[in-house]
Image (spheres, rainbow, N blue to C red):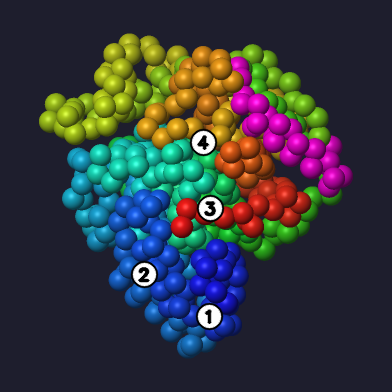
């Protein structure tokens, strides 16, 4: 088997080959490390590598197999951790000069679970400062470009995570999502990214920049089954996170191939308020929607009342960053991303009434989604309103030649951070320029299993993994 093929192998296949001793974790790890050393100077997906730690973990994984011990799900599988998540003894910067030399003394709970399950951690992936925006660059590590076009953005804030898996630098990447930060880069880079229900994967410690009731942790992968595998390990309650959900007693990986007999699926190209969607995105999404009918599932357009939650989301986001970073502003202002400084200063200008007003609108929007899901099992939307845009800007100012607001390109993602519903981005087509297009699959609250099953069915009908970027 060629080294190149191993770099793009699924985590499920890797796990099986390690378990059967067809390949060792140490062999796979060295091949992935070689790939990172070759590719990362171009893609800049990893901001900090932990190759020595990874080699130690791979050796332990192989010894576990040789001793015929119980083999955990992720035994020996190369994995990356986003640089917003602490790893004991490994520099964790949050993409900020403020924490440029920060070395955590403890693992985040999700890292501990991944380690305990035998994965091989090869490093931290790049993110914008505190994950505040939907593109990936910062003042420490620079830009993570799109593997399909180095002049385009990889998305964010999990841009390093998505770029790493698409570029063959490991099959599993841990991402996080406060407004689309798993789904944006998965869409732009051509990966599968799942934002679980809020609370499904615990967040601890909760840093002051964790998004509070908006952010979740989830997988970014090349294969849907790998997302189920990774989520099985990361999910479950943790007492330190008061928002964490009780155990659902479901093994996602064991049931992912079970295709539901009957489903009613609604689709929307506007959610009732999105003003414009790129023509190529719209065409690819509409073509993909009809593929679900081939499974015998009922598909129809879902109608929404015009209800725009954009300002409420922006208000909460800006106020959160404003008051969390206010103590750092005087000392660090000239070393913080200028866009973030603008956000912080804007957040500090909001009157006290802005937050309860935003929370009221959030509750009203949740009610509208709740009413919609009375009629449907699954909701389909574009993942983003545009394909990957030019690197160096925070958002496109026009879509289809029409002037748009800063949140217009991400109009389909942040609403489901507001509501807490599980939502995945899956590749569904390509632009004429060869950029990936994403379809968002949204489930009812706590219905990750159904989202994964529907995603797996679509993947089998419209696989995309044969396409690989050709930058090197």
Q: Nearer the N terminus, badge 3 or badge 2?
A: 2
- CA gap, disc 3 to disc 4? 14 Å
Q: Quadrant of residue 48?
A: bottom left
Q: Nearer the N terminus, badge 1 or badge 2?
A: 1
Disc tally is: 4
Residue 63 visible, this angle: yes
| Callout in the foreground (3, 4) | 3
Q: Nearer the N terminus, badge 4 or badge 1?
A: 1
Farthest-out residue, right: 296
Give the numbered dot on residue 382: none
- CA gap, disc 2 to disc 4? 32 Å
Residues at marks 2 and 4 touching, judged by CB atoms closer than 8 Å = no
Give the numbered dot on residue 388: 4
Residue depicted at x 57% and y 41%: 435
- CA gap, disc 3 to disc 2? 25 Å
Judged from the image, the secondary structure of the residue bearing numbered disc 4 is loop
| Callout in the foreground (1, 2) | 1
Vertical arrangement, residue 449 with respect to residue 27, above or below: above
Q: Nearer the N terminus, badge 3 or badge 1?
A: 1
Query: What residue would you read off at disc 2?
Result: 54
Residue depicted at x 36% and y 70%: 54
Query: What residue would you read off at disc 3?
Result: 469
| Rendering coords of residue 134 (x, y %) | 43, 34
Magenta residues (range): 275-298
Vertical arrangement, residue 31 with respect to residue 194, above or below: below
Magenta stretch: includes residue 97:
no
| Rendering coords of residue 272 (x, y %) | 65, 18
Q: Nearer the N terminus, badge 3 or badge 4?
A: 4
Residue depicted at x 57% and y 55%: 468
Query: What residue would you read off at disc 1?
Result: 23
Residues at marks 1 and 2 touching, judged by CB atoms closer than 8 Å = no
- CA gap, disc 1 to disc 2? 16 Å
């Amino acid at each position: 088997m060629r080294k190149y093929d191993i770099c793009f192998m699924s985590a499920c296949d890797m796990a099986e080959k390690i378990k059967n001793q067809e390949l060792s974790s140490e062999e796979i790890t060295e091949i992935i490390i070689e790939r990172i050393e070759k590719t990362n100077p171009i893609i800049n997906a990893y901001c900090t590598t932990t190759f020595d730690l990874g080699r130690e973990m791979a050796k332990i994984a192989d010894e576990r197999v040789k001793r015929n011990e119980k083999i955990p799900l992720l035994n020996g599988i190369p994995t990356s951790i986003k640089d917003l998540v602490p790893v004991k003894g490994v520099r964790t910067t949050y993409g900020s000069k403020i924490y440029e030399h920060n070395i955590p003394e403890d693992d985040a709970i999700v890292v501990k679970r991944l380690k305990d399950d035998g994965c091989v951690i090869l490093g931290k992936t790049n993110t914008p400062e505190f994950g505040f925006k939907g593109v990936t660059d910062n003042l420490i590590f620079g830009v993570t470009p799109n593997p399909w076009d180095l002049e385009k953005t990889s998305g964010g804030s999990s841009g390093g995570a998505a770029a790493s898996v698409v570029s063959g630098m490991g099959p599993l990447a841990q991402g996080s999502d406060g407004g689309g930060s798993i789904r944006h880069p998965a869409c732009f880079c051509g990966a599968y990214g799942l934002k679980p229900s809020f609370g499904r994967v615990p967040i601890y410690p909760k840093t002051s920049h964790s998004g509070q009731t908006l952010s979740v942790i989830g997988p970014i992968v090349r294969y849907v089954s790998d997302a189920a595998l990774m989520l099985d390990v990361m999910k479950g309650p943790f007492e330190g996170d008061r928002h964490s959900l009780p155990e659902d007693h479901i093994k996602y990986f064991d049931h992912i191939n079970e295709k539901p007999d009957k489903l009613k699926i609604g689709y929307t190209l506007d959610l009732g308020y999105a003003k414009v969607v790129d023509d190529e995105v719209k065409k690819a999404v509409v073509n993909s929607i009809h593929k679900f009918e081939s499974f015998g599932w009922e598909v129809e357009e879902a109608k929404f009342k015009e209800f725009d939650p954009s300002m409420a989301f922006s208000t909460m986001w800006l106020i959160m960053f404003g008051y969390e970073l206010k103590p750092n502003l005087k000392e660090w202002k000239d070393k913080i991303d200028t866009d973030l400084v603008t956000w912080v200063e804007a957040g500090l200008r909001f009157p006290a009434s802005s937050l309860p007003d935003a929370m009221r609108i959030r509750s009203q929007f949740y009610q509208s989604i709740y009413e919609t899901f009375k009629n449907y099992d699954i909701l389909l939307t574009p993942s983003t309103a545009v394909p990957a845009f030019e690197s160096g800007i925070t958002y496109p100012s026009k879509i289809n030649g029409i002037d748009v607001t800063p949140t217009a390109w991400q109009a389909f993602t942040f609403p489901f951070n507001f509501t807490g519903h599980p939502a995945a981005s899956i590749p569904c087509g390509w632009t004429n320029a060869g950029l990936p297009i994403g379809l968002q699959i949204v489930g009812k609250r706590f219905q990750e299993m159904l989202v994964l099953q529907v995603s797996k069915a679509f993947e089998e009908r419209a696989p995309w993994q044969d396409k690989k970027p050709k930058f090197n």
